Structures are given as C-alpha cells and as structure tokens.
C-alpha cells in the first residue's frame, strides 16, 4: 500500500499538469484551468445565483478558474439568466463567490462579455442589438418569450465605440471590487470583440474595419482600458481563431490572429487563451504560440494525456478543460489518480438549478 501510494505520488509529480505555475503575481497550484462556461442559472437582474458559490468552490482545486461569461452592461446581454458585472447586486453576489474560492486556496478570473449581434430586441426594450456591421447571424436566441430568430443588428457608429470601451473599463473595475484575481476578455466564439476581429462579420470602411490592423483596433482599445484597471499581468484574452460558432468566418484566420496575438503580446497581457479543437486539422494555435511572450493556454477536447503532452512539448503552459469540469468538480484529483471520469449530462448545461450543477459528487466524498 505504502509503495503504491508513493508510486502514485511520483507519477503525479512527474506529470506537467501538476507542476505549480507562476502566472505573473499569482501562484497557481497546478496547470489545470477550468474553462469559462455559461450555466444560465443567474437570478432576476442577472445576479449570480447563490448556488454558483457552491459550484465554483467545488471546483477550486483547478489551478485557475475562469468564470462563465458575464455582461459588462445591459447592452451586452444576449441570453437569459447569464450573470452581469454592472450592478451593485451583481458585484455583491460575485464577492461571495470569489471569497468562497479564495478560502479553498483557488484563483478565479472573471470573463468579461459583450455579445454584440448575438442578441435580440427583446433584451433591449425593442432596440436592435449592436455590431460592427449590419449583418445578421444565423440561428435563434432564447429570450424570456421563447426562442426567436436573430435579427440584423445595427452597425455601431464610430462615435459610440469609446462608450463601449468604458463599459468594459467599468466591468473591470467592478470585477476588482468583487475580489477577482484578474479578468479575461471574451474575444472568442463570435461575440462583439470577435465580430470586430474577423472579416466575415466586420465590413466597416472606417478606421475599425478593412485591414487587420483596423479590425483589431477596437478589441485592443478595450484591452488597454482593462489593463489601465488591472495592470497587464492580470489580464487574459480568449480567441477562437477557426471557430465557426455564431456564424463566424474569416478569410485568413492565421494572418488575422497572428497579428492580434503580436499586439496583445506587445501589451504584455498575462495570458492568451486559444480555444480550437486539439484534433482539428490545420490548427492555427501552433502558429500563435511563438508570437506570444506571456502565458499560453490551450483548450478544446483535451484529456489528461493530451494536456500533459501539450505542456511537455512546449505547445502550452496551461491547459483549460470545459465539459470535463462540469461532472468532475475534483478533476485534478481524478487526473492525478488516473480515475475514470463521470459523464456530463448536456441536458442540464443551461437548466436544472442544482441538478447537473452542484450535485456531481467529488470522488472522495
Ligand atoms: C455549457 C457550456 C458553456 C460555455 N460557455 C462559454 C463561455 O461562457 N465563454 C467561453 O469563452 N466559452 C464557453 N464555452 C466553451 C468552453 O469554454 C470550451 O471552450 C469548450 O467546452 C471546449 O473545451 P472542452 O473540450 O474542454 O469542453 C462553453 C462550453 C459549454 C459546454
């Protein structure tokens, strides 16, 4: 028994996922990151549910938790029951969550979100959602009145952009007041920052469209504002260079995201978080790694073996896990013991209150 325990400890120690990591000023106990995941359980006023305190505390053994995407303003809302970071009630609820994670020795970043065109007039008193260009995404959004087809958004006037930069700045300040360790900008999956970045959704002819330099101008303005609040090391940025979700396309993802990566590297942000399926062909992720001087996080279908391999080969510093963390709150423990993983029930991804949320047991329970 004693030998087996020692052997298990040795094999765990030898695995890169279990090496501690210094993320700027933050000491992470391992390299396993919990990926941001919308769980649609917020209360009226987009206030985080008290259940979220249990949910995130249960998962605090991750080296770093990145929260579900959280709106920086009412204009940034596009889904029911998603939390925000723009009202005193939201800040107070988040403060209880960050305190619970800190008590467990965990670290937690808030993902700052503005959905842009992935919304519906139902969320905005009948006004159109805003976007870089008046191009409708395919598909439906779920509003309080049920599923509705997405509409053609209103193209933002350039004069409105500084106001949205301020929404992000305020969100970043509020995240600080709520006790987070840092913030991640949601630049992925077809939301506002991504809509500006990729040329399928940005047909502007002013300083914010056309060339790659112009298309990333607004995302970089937002990043600079958030750095003003947090300092560069506690700011992360997430991208999905080849993701098609939310009707996204780009004529040259490698060029677009290489340029953005270089500029984010110049700004000295703490990490770049790239989500792209590990099994995909022609991945852009490997091309971005050498262009970024900070911490590099990969995500997309990784398991323990592929995560360890990615770090061992120098392809990543940290590996983020999404779906596996839903049903396995103690995912690092299970990875360390080579335990089998519980299956996640997609039916409770976005509904069910505690069911499929806080009722997945830890192995040791
Ligand atoms: C239920 C659910 C909600 C998600 N919500 C977000 C989100 O709020 N922000 C985000 O950047 N990605 C979101 N994602 C994507 C995940 O962060 C992750 O990129 C994806 O699940 C792939 O990683 P995995 O294979 O480890 O699950 C979500 C994924 C799922 C399954």
Image (cartoon, helix red, strand yellow):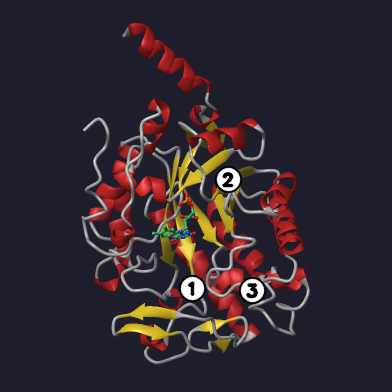
Indicate which quadrant contains ligand 1. bottom left
Q: Which residue appears at 74% of the width and 60% of the height? A: 254
Q: Position of residue 3 (x, y in %)?
A: 38, 7
Above or below — where is 196 with respect to 362?
below
Reading the image, the residue beneath label 2 is 297
Which numbered circle lies on residue 115?
A: 1
What secondary structure is marked by label 1?
Answer: loop
Above or below — where is 75 with respect to 318?
below
Tell me: 61 left or right of 152. Answer: left
Dot placed on the residue nearer the N-terminal end, 2 or 3: 3
Q: Nearer the viewer, residue 215 or 274?
A: 274
Above or below — where is 23 with respect to 197?
above
What is the distance, in whole Å, between disc 3 and disc 1 at their CAs?
12 Å
Above or below — where is 158 with respect to 199?
below
Reading the image, the residue beneath label 3 is 196
| Label 2 with label 3: CB-CB less than 8 Å | no
Q: Which residue appears at 61% of the width and 61% of the height? A: 223
What is the distance, in whole Å, between disc 2 and disc 1 at their CAs?
23 Å
Dot placed on the residue nearer the N-terminal end, 3 or 1: 1
What is the distance, in whole Å, between disc 2 and disc 3 at their CAs?
22 Å
Dot placed on the residue nearer the N-terminal end, 2 or 1: 1
Answer few, some or many: residues within 10 Å of disc 1's Cα (few below 14, many 20 plus, some between 14 and 19). many
Q: Nearer the viewer, residue 6 or 113?
A: 6
């Amino acid at each position: 028994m004693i030998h087996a325990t020692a052997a298990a400890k040795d094999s765990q120690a030898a695995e890169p996922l279990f090496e501690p990591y210094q993320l700027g000023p933050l000491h992470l106990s391992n390299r396993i990151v919990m990926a941001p995941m919308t769980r649609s359980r917020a209360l009226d006023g987009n206030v985080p549910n008290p259940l979220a305190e249990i949910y995130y505390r249960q998962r605090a053994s991750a080296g770093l938790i990145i929260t579900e995407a959280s709106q920086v303003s009412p204009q940034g809302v596009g889904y029911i029951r998603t939390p925000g970071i723009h009202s005193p009630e939201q800040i107070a609820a988040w403060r209880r969550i960050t305190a619970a994670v800190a008590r467990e020795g965990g670290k937690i970043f808030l993902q700052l979100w503005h959905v842009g065109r992935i919304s519906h007039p139902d969320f905005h008193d009948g006004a159109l959602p805003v976007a870089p260009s008046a191009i409708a995404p395919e598909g439906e959004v779920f509003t309080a009145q049920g599923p509705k087809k997405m509409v053609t958004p209103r193209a933002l006037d350039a004069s409105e952009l500084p106001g949205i930069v301020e929404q992000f700045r305020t969100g970043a300040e509020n995240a600080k007041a709520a006790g987070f360790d840092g913030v991640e900008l949601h630049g992925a999956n077809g939301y506002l920052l991504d809509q500006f970045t990729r040329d399928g959704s940005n047909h502007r002819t002013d300083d914010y469209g056309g060339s790659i330099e112009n298309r990333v101008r607004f995302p970089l303005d937002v990043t600079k504002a958030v750095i003003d609040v947090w300092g560069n090391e506690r700011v992360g940025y997430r991208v999905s260079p080849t993701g098609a979700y939310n009707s996204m396309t780009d004529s040259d993802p490698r060029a677009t995201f290489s340029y953005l990566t270089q500029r984010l590297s110049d700004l000295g942000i703490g990490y770049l978080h790239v989500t792209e399926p590990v099994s995909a062909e022609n991945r852009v992720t490997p091309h971005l790694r050498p262009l970024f001087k900070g911490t590099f996080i990969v995500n997309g279908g990784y398991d323990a073996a592929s995560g360890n391999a990615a770090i061992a080969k120098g392809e990543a510093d940290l590996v983020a896990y999404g779906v596996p963390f839903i049903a396995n709150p103690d995912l690092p423990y299970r990875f360390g013991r080579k335990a089998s993983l519980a299956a996640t029930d997609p039916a409770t991804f976005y509904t069910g209150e505690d069911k499929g949320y806080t009722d997945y047991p830890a192995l040791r329970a």
